[in-house]
Amino acid sequence: MSFIYSDPDRSVTAYRKPTPSEIRFGNGATHYKDFPRSLWTKPNGDLKRWIVCVIDGLRYYRSTH
């Protein structure tokens, strides 16, 4: 599963594929991170399909299922 609500009212667990440099250094696994649900919510209340993490600058995705 690539998308998990760890607590639907507070956070969303998202994933990203490894970068080419992470693969070269042996960190080629899918990365998961929890984000506050407020970062995912559009003004109309729908959830975004992806966001950019302010810490690492990489795009994290959620499943559309």
Image (cartoon, rainbow, N blue to C red):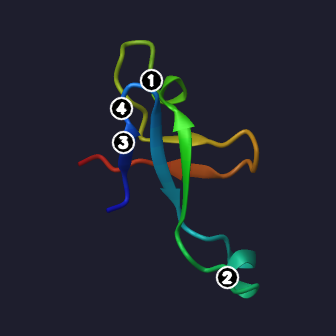
Q: Nearer the viewer, residue 10 or 49?
A: 10
Foreground disc of the pair 3, 1: 3
Is 56 left, or right, of 39 in this rendering? right
| Tag 1: amino acid | Thr
Quote the CA–CA distance across marks 3 and 1: 14 Å
| Residue under numbered circle 3 | 5
Quote the CA–CA distance across marks 4 and 3: 5 Å
| Residue under numbered circle 1 | 41
Foreground disc of the pair 1, 4: 4
Quote the CA–CA distance across marks 3 and 2: 27 Å
- Image point (67%, 82%), residue name: 23
- Image point (67%, 52%), residue name: 58
Crowdedness of circle 1 by 10 Å Cα count: few (<14), some, many (20+)? Answer: few
Q: Is residue 23 above or below residue 3?
A: below
Number of on-image labels: 4
| Tag 4: amino acid | Pro
Tell me residue 4's x, y (percent): 36, 49
Crowdedness of circle 2 by 10 Å Cα count: few (<14), some, many (20+)? Answer: few
N-terminal label among 1 and 4: 4
Is 15 left, or right, of 5 in this rendering? right
Tell me residue 36's x, y (percent): 54, 31
| Residue under numbered circle 2 | 23
Kindly state the secondary structure of the residue where label 4 is placed: loop
| Residue under numbered circle 4 | 8
